[in-house]
Amino acid sequence: MKKNLFYMALLLVAMASCSPATKITRTWTSPQKNATGYTNLYLAAVIGDMTIRTSFESDVQAKLNRLGINSTTSSSTIQPNFWMSTDLDKNAMMRIIGEKGNDAIMTMTLIDVQNEQRYIPGTMNAGMMAGPGMWGPGWGMGGAGNFGGFWGMHHGMMMTPGHIVNDRKYFVEINIYDVKSELLVWTGQSKTTNPSSVDKFSREFAEVVLKRMQRERVIQPQQN
């Protein structure tokens, strides 16, 4: 029984290490959203760093392309300092969107970065499973009836010390605006924990967020 629990714990750890670092924490949908979903998005990552902005927009666009959905990125159509301007001209942006035939605007904004500490408990050495007499008659919480049995039972139960790790969490707000009405029709928030690189962050963000948007009929794939 204990051996099975040990291997089950190892399996859960392995599964956790493969799970996405990005998760959707909340969404909201307006009743005024296009009922069938949008098919031509204008992508705008409202991020000051040009490299990060381009990475997010490009990866979202690549995923949309695979779904057969058209899109235009802000990094390919407006000045690099547009978002930092003190005289932000919405009309100039809407003119560009009108020229591209977009039916919705998707904005992505980094709204918070949090540092959090957590304790990782120590783990028992696998050798504890191999000691002679471990599963023999009379085994129990009180140990074996003689020193040889006790040593065979406990010599492998070495514990790797626990330790504290620092998690860095990034929260991104995603908004979808209907171009005709300019109203907010869908919003969501994602949380990404300890991304190993900007590229991995943006690729996983695109996969997770667009999958959720597809499920909630925010976008309409055009694949056969």
Image (cartoon, rainbow, N blue to C red):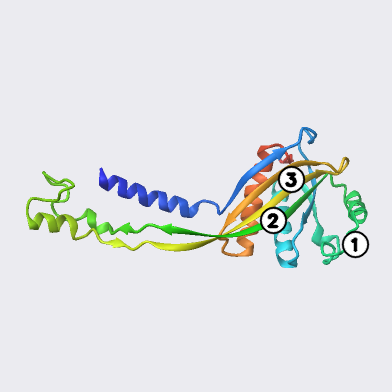
Q: What's the residue type where badge 1 is placed? A: Asp
Q: What's the residue type where badge 3 is placed? A: Gly
Residue in front for this viewpoint, 166 or 127? 166
Residue indicated by mark 2: 111
176 left or right of 19 in image: right
- The secondary structure type at the circle numbered 1 is loop
Residue indicated by mark 1: 87
x and y, in percent, of residue 148 in the image:
8, 57
Q: Quadrant of the N terminus?
A: top left
Instruction: Using the numbered discs, state the Cα–Cα distance from disc 1 to disc 2 in whole angstroms.
Output: 22 Å
N-terminal of the pair, mark 2 or mark 3, is 3
Q: What's the residue type where badge 2 is placed? A: Ile
- The secondary structure type at the circle numbered 3 is loop
> Do the residues under discs 2 and 3 have CB atoms within 8 angstroms?
no
Residue in the image at 29% along x and 45% along y: 4
- The secondary structure type at the circle numbered 2 is strand
Task: Choose top left, top right, bottom left or bottom right for residue 158.
Answer: bottom left
Residue in front for this viewpoint, 31 or 132? 31
Mark in the foreground, 2 or 3: 2
N-terminal of the pair, mark 1 or mark 2, is 1
x and y, in percent, of residue 7 in the image:
32, 49
Q: Quadrant of the C terminus?
A: top right
N-terminal of the pair, mark 3 or mark 1, is 3
x and y, in percent, of residue 109 in the image:
72, 55
- Label 2 Cα crowd, 10 Å radius (few <14 / some 14-19 / many 20+): few
- Label 3 Cα crowd, 10 Å radius (few <14 / some 14-19 / many 20+): some
Residue in the image at 76% along x and 52% along y: 107
Residue indicated by mark 3: 68
Residue at the left extreme, as displayed: 146
- Label 1 Cα crowd, 10 Å radius (few <14 / some 14-19 / many 20+): few
